[in-house]
C-alpha cells in the first residue's frame, strides 16, 4: 500500500463519513438536535473520532503524533498566547461579518432553535454547564474539530510535496468544513470557511495544534457563556 493510497484511505475513513452524514442530515431532516443530543453526540462521536484519527495516524499513516500534529517549535505558554491572539482575530472577523457578509447574504431559512434551546437548558442546570464547558467543549468540539482539520490537511499534503498543492488543499479542506455547517446558511458557510483558512494557514506555517484547540474552545465558549448569562439575568 503506497503512501498516497494510505492517506486517501485515512481521509475516507475518518473525515469524509462524518461530514457527509452531517451534510445529508441537514439537507434531509427537519427536526433539530435536542439538548441531550447536543451534549451526548459531541462526546460520543467527537471523542470516538479523535481516538480513530490518532489510531489511523499511527498505524495507517505511520507517523507519530508530533510529526503530524505538533512538529513546530513552541511551548505551552507561547501556544496559549498565540491562541488568545487567534481568538481576538476570530471575534474581529465575527463582528465584521455581521456588518457585511450577513447583511449581504441574509439567511431566509427558518430559525434554527437547537442552540437557543440548549442555552436555555444550560442556563438552568449548573451540572450541565460544567459538562458542556468541560469535556463537551474541549474534547467533543474543539479538540475533535481541530484534530480533524489538521489530520485532513496533513493527509492531503502527504499526497504531494508541491507547495501550490498545499495551498489548494487548505482551500479544499476549508470548503468542506464550511459546507458541513450549512445549517448556518450561506453566510455561515462562508464565515466558517474563512476562519478555517486562517487556522489552516497558521498550522501550515507553525505546525502547532494546541493554539488551534484553545482558540476554538475560547471562541465558542465565550459566545455560549455570553448567551447563558443573558438567559440567567
Image (cartoon, rainbow, N blue to C red):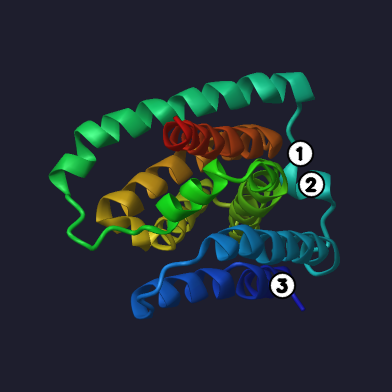
Label 2, on which residue? 67
For the point 60% across and 38% down, which residue is it? 217
Q: Position of residue 156 (x, y in %)?
A: 59, 60
In what quadrant of the picture does the N terminus appear? bottom right
For the point 82% across and 49% down, which residue is it? 65
Q: Secondary structure at mark 2?
A: helix
* Label of residue 50 in the image: none
* Label of residue 71 in the image: 1
Residue 94, by quadrant, is top left
Q: CA distance from mark 1 to mark 3?
A: 21 Å
Q: Going from the N terminus, do you reach mark 1 or mark 3 first?
A: 3
Label 3, on which residue? 6
Q: CA distance from mark 2 to mark 3?
A: 16 Å
177 vs 130, left or right, is left
Residue 75 visible (yes or no):
no
Q: Position of residue 161 (x, y in %)?
A: 61, 53
Amino acid at each position: 500500500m503506497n503512501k498516497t493510497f494510505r492517506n486517501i484511505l485515512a481521509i475516507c475513513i475518518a473525515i469524509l463519513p462524518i461530514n457527509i452524514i452531517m451534510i445529508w442530515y441537514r439537507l434531509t431532516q427537519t427536526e433539530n438536535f435536542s439538548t441531550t443530543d447536543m451534549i451526548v453526540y459531541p462526546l460520543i462521536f467527537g471523542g470516538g473520532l479523535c481516538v480513530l484519527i490518532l489510531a489511523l495516524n499511527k498505524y495507517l499513516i505511520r507517523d507519530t503524533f508530533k510529526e503530524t500534529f505538533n512538529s513546530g517549535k513552541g511551548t505551552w505558554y507561547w501556544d496559549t498566547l498565540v491562541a488568545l491572539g487567534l481568538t481576538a482575530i476570530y471575534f474581529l472577523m465575527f463582528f465584521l461579518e455581521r456588518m457585511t457578509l450577513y447583511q449581504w447574504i441574509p439567511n431566509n431559512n427558518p430559525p434554527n432553535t437547537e442552540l437557543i434551546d440548549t442555552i436555555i437548558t444550560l442556563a438552568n442546570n449548573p451540572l450541565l454547564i460544567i459538562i458542556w464547558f468541560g469535556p463537551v467543549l474541549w474534547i467533543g468540539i474543539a479538540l475533535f474539530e481541530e484534530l480533524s482539520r489538521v489530520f485532513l490537511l496533513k493527509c492531503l499534503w502527504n499526497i504531494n510535496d508541491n507547495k501550490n498543492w498545499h495551498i489548494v488543499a487548505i482551500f479544499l479542506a476549508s470548503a468542506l468544513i464550511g459546507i458541513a455547517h450549512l445549517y448556518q446558511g450561506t453566510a455561515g458557510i462562508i464565515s466558517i470557511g474563512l476562519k478555517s483558512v486562517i487556522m489552516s494557514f497558521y498550522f501550515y506555517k507553525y505546525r502547532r495544534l494546541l493554539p488551534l484547540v484553545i482558540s476554538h474552545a475560547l471562541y465558542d465558549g465565550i459566545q455560549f457563556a455570553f448567551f447563558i448569562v443573558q438567559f440567567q439575568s
